[in-house]
């Protein structure tokens, strides 16, 4: 069968017989025909990764990963620039030969979306709110949105809830896109500066507060319960979606 496929390909494109493959995209391939096994390793890639990004004195650790990793409180400009490179390389490693580090790499919040709303910002008689979102692939802005909501929110929490639902749809699109090309980005994170929205999104018991809202806006709650997304609090001054819902002034910029 393999021979027939090679013949068909050879009819359309020029091919050279190079023998058994030993390396492919940085993966070392060792085949044992007698045992009918194939071994895949990225030892050289890991060594190169360590040499580039990790000091030799810090390489050994008796604890692979804390149960709850401590958040990064301060990082230099050089470290913020280097970190996305490291995570990208670790993602390639986890998708290649080391699925055992997938969870640890996923803790880095590779895919996030900032969500915000400005309640009743429309000055017309409709008094509708505005939604804003900003999607980041490891701190790199890849998509953004600023638009009036299609429903009239009765409170700031409702407006933020609708905005968070719209942000959920956007970030899940990118998760599915990465999955289609073989990249596991973990669980996307929605960042909101409204604690009420976070509460009603997580707790089904709070359903009565927003049961009058169109069912499509409860999309976020279902996906949080199913483990497809997670929602966290972010301070208003750090919410990068603010710029898409209201004038923020030169100080914020």
Image (tube, grey):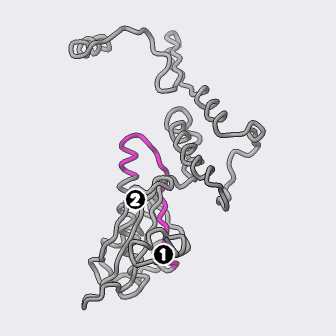
Q: Quadrant of residue 41?
A: top right
Query: Relative to 201, is 88 above or below?
Result: above
Q: Point out which mark residue 155 bears.
A: none
Write the residue at 45% across / 77% down.
248
Q: Mark 2, residues whose alpha carbon is within 10 Å: few (<14), some, or many (≥20)?
A: many
Q: Residue 68: in sight, yes or no?
A: no
Q: Secondary structure at mark 2?
A: helix
Q: In the figure, 130 relative to 53: above or below? A: below
Residue 106, position in %: x, y? 54, 50
Q: Is residue 249 magenta?
A: no
For residue 171, what is the image quadrant?
Answer: bottom left
Nearest the viewer among 36 and 233 is: 233
* Residue 96 point in image, percent of width and height: 50, 33
Q: Quadrant of the N terminus?
A: top left
Q: Earlier in the sequence, mark 2 or mark 1?
A: 2
Label disc, if present, on residue 250 of the rendered structure: 1
Q: Which residues are magenta?
A: 175-195
114 lies above or below 182: below
Which residue lies at the image location 42% right of the left edge and 77% below the top edge? 160
Q: Is residue 222 left or right of residue 152?
A: right
Which element carries disc 1, helix, strand or loop?
helix
Crowd around label 1: few <14 · some 14–19 · many ≥20 (10 Å): few
């Amino acid at each position: 069968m393999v021979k027939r496929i090679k013949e068909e390909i050879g009819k359309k494109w020029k091919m050279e017989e190079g023998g058994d493959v030993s390396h492919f995209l940085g993966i070392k391939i060792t085949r044992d025909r007698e045992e009918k096994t194939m071994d895949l390793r990225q030892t050289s890639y890991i060594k190169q990764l360590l040499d580039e990004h990790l000091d030799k004195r810090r390489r050994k650790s008796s604890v692979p990963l804390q149960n709850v990793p401590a958040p990064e409180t301060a990082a230099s400009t050089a470290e913020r620039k280097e970190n996305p490179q490291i995570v990208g390389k670790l993602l390639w490693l986890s998708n290649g030969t080391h699925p055992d580090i997938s969870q640890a790499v996923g803790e880095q919040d590779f895919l996030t979306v900032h969500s915000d709303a400005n309640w009743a910002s429309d000055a017309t008689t409709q008094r509708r709110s505005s939604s804003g979102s900003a999607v980041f692939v490891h701190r790199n802005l890849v998509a953004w949105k600023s638009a009036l909501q299609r429903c009239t929110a009765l409170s700031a929490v409702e407006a933020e809830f609708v905005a968070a639902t719209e942000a959920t749809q956007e970030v899940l699109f990118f998760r599915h896109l990465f999955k289609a090309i073989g990249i596991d980005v973990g669980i996307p994170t929605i960042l909101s500066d409204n604690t009420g929205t976070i509460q009603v999104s997580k707790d089904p018991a709070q359903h009565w507060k927003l049961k009058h809202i169109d069912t499509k806006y409860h999309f976020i709650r279902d996906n949080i319960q199913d483990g497809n997304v997670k929602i966290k609090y972010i301070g208003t001054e750090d919410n990068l979606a603010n710029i898409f819902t209201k004038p923020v002034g030169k100080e914020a910029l």
